[in-house]
Amino acid sequence: MSKKLSKRLQYIADMVDMNAYIADIGADHGHLPIYLIESGKISYAQAVENKMGPYLNLKHNVDESGLASHILVTLADGISNLSSGVDTLILAGMGGRLSIDILAAHPENLEHIDTIILDPHRDLSKVRHYLSNNAYHIECEKMVYEDKIYYSIIKAKKGAPEAPYTIDELRFGPYLMAHPDDTYMAYLEAQRKNVSNILNNNLNPSQRDQYLELYRAISNQIKAYNEAK
């Protein structure tokens, strides 16, 4: 049986559709595709690494699992060499800008990708903006706290949003705004504290206006949640 997943990877696994054909980009040790196949949720997967050392470790783990006929292990750069039939991309354990760079490097390979699942803990607004600009809408988003880090796990589906995302929706996530929970609120409180600390520094007028506006936007999200409880 596969190794138990971390909280973050378990939420990602839960977001994978039944019978999806995933490509796990930067698959590391391969725990996610191995778990998904052993659990019966999917039948086939591609696991991708771009450096020889991690690729060999990944291949060893897949071979040891006895699932080599179900998991194609690929040495490739990002999504440059996707297997035919892959309909779901997973980009986990990397920053938002790197995720965008990987997707943007081969837009032609997104043609048959129905679902993209990411867990960036930085540059979230840029990720949401990229997805919406490339005709994907955010179907679900979950904030997870693990190892003292907040991860926002985003599940995007092909099809442009019904309306362009607002500035606040890009900042905070349209799904999270509509379905807030305590972890998301704790994240916002942490963000508000960070912005408050920045405001205590010597900022030029333009920077101060920018961070004051962000502080007010975060405070409004927290206020709306508390009033709705």
Image (cartoon, rainbow, N blue to C red):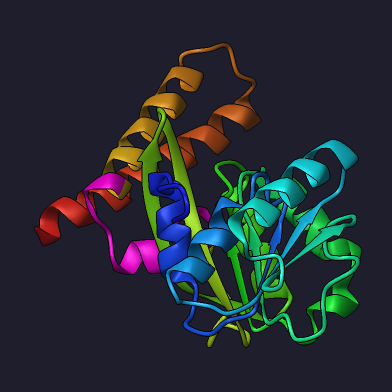
Residue at 62% from the left image edge and 88% from the top image edge: 159
The reply to whether residue 217 is in sight is: no
Quarter location, residue 113: bottom right
Residue 140 horizontal side relative to residue 124, left or right? left
Quarter location, residue 15: bottom left
The N terminus, quarter of image:
bottom left
Pick whichever, 225 or 56, lies toward us.
56
Q: Main secondary structure of the magenta part?
A: helix
Most distant residue in the left direction: 229
Q: Is residue 59 above or below residue 89?
A: above
Residue 77 horizontal side relative to residue 70, left or right? right
Magenta residue check for 86? no
Q: Position of residue 12 (x, y in %)?
A: 47, 60
Residue at 20% from the left image edge and 55% from the top image edge: 225
Question: Magenta segment range?
Answer: 170-183
Residue at 67% from the left image edge and 43% from the top image edge: 95
Residue at 70% from the left image edge and 55% from the top image edge: 63
The reply to whether residue 1 is in sight is: yes
